[in-house]
Image: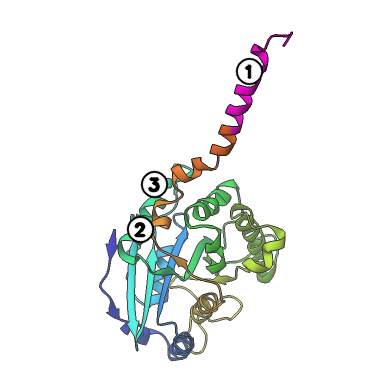
Amino acid sequence: MAIQLIKEWTAIHQFPAATQEKLVDLLAKLKNEKVDTLTILVMGKGGVGKSSTVNSIIGERVVTVSAFQSETPRPVMVSRTRSGFTLNIIDTPGLVEGGYVSDQVLDTIKSFLGRFLMKNTIDVLLYVDRLDAYRVDNLDKQVVKGITDSFGKEIWHKAMVVLTHAQLSPPDALSYEEFFSKRSESLLKCVRQGARISKKDLKNFAIPIALVENSGRCNKNDHDEKILPTGTPWIPNLVHTITDVALNGKSGILIDQKLIEGPNANDRGKIFIPLILAFQRWIKDDAAREAKPSWA
């Protein structure tokens, strides 16, 4: 587990001037809404670009990314301050080990949060996957279910999907917009199923999507900003979407002992006590009827 000292967000000056201006405006918007601390939790499978996305948001290499190591081995929190505003981003290990969702990894993440952020809130969840992953399967649904079981269904009120590797050429002669639409809808459907979001709740769980291209080969516009194939500068667009989620009127997820420990086994058992007692009474009454003489 690792936590870095809170530092001044000097790397914001490394962004192109046009990006800097947009980021400063978004930070001002948060402060105007009395938000002086923003905590972002980054989760997903391994090798999807979580750590690279954290580095891109901060503007410097704060989390190690290696071709020989597809993911961070333990949770890492990066904190930056600027003009009285504090940004915390928690990078996490991939949730899948040996083809299954790892409860141990989820517990490690919650323990980390309890150790360093107790009584604070998770303000935004970045659920990260790849745009160029052409299939959604049951494992994706299980990953979403694992997050839901660990943090509660409510965490999806504060969630957005981030799709990395966005600079691609779509297959099957699809346009970029068509491919993005199909990929987004299939993944959102998976999220709704894994999070048990019913059709009537869809409006309450509007989960936005942002595209990301962390590669140094990402195309740029005339202002030197990294852009998507659509021409959109993706870093300010990502931070804009994060800001919208943070200010969507839904409560952040409180990090407390109940969240860290999960559902109490004793409490879960208590709901069955009335049924057990009723069954015991039925058995007792049935036995009494059997023992009663036929002439009585």
Q: Secondary structure at mark 3?
A: helix
Q: Residue at x 68, y 64 (%)?
A: 202
Q: Secondary structure at mark 1?
A: helix
Residue 63 appears in the picture as rendered: no
| First in residue order: circle 3 vs circle 1 | 3
Choose mark 3 or mark 2, whichever is in front: 3
Task: Note whether 30 is above or below 167 in the view shown.
Answer: below
Q: Residue at x 57, y 76 (%)?
A: 248
| Image quadrant in which you'd find residue 66 | bottom left
Residue 41 placement (x, y as % from top left): 43, 65
Q: Spatial distance from mark 3 to mark 1, Cα to Cα?
A: 50 Å
- Label 2 sits on residue: 72
Residue 161 placement (x, y as % from top left): 55, 66
Q: Quadrant of the C terminus?
A: top right
Residue 142 placement (x, y as % from top left): 55, 48
Residue 2 placement (x, y as % from top left): 28, 62
Q: Label 2 is placed on what type of residue?
A: Thr
- Label 1 sits on residue: 288
Q: Label 1 is placed on what type of residue?
A: Ala
| First in residue order: circle 3 vs circle 2 | 2
Task: Please tell me whether residue 229 belongs to the stretch shown in magenta.
Answer: no
The range drawn in magenta is 278-296
Task: Note whether 81 is above or below 62 in the view shown.
Answer: below
Choose mark 3 or mark 1, whichever is in front: 1
Q: Secondary structure at mark 2?
A: loop
User: Dot 2: within a 10 Å radius of its alpha carbon, few (fewer than 14), some, or many (20 or more) residues?
Assistant: some
Q: Label 3 is placed on what type of residue?
A: Gln
Q: Spatial distance from mark 2 to mark 1, Cα to Cα?
A: 64 Å
Q: Residue at x 46, y 49 (%)?
A: 263
Disc assigned to residue 104? 3
Q: Nearer the viewer, residue 104 or 127?
A: 104
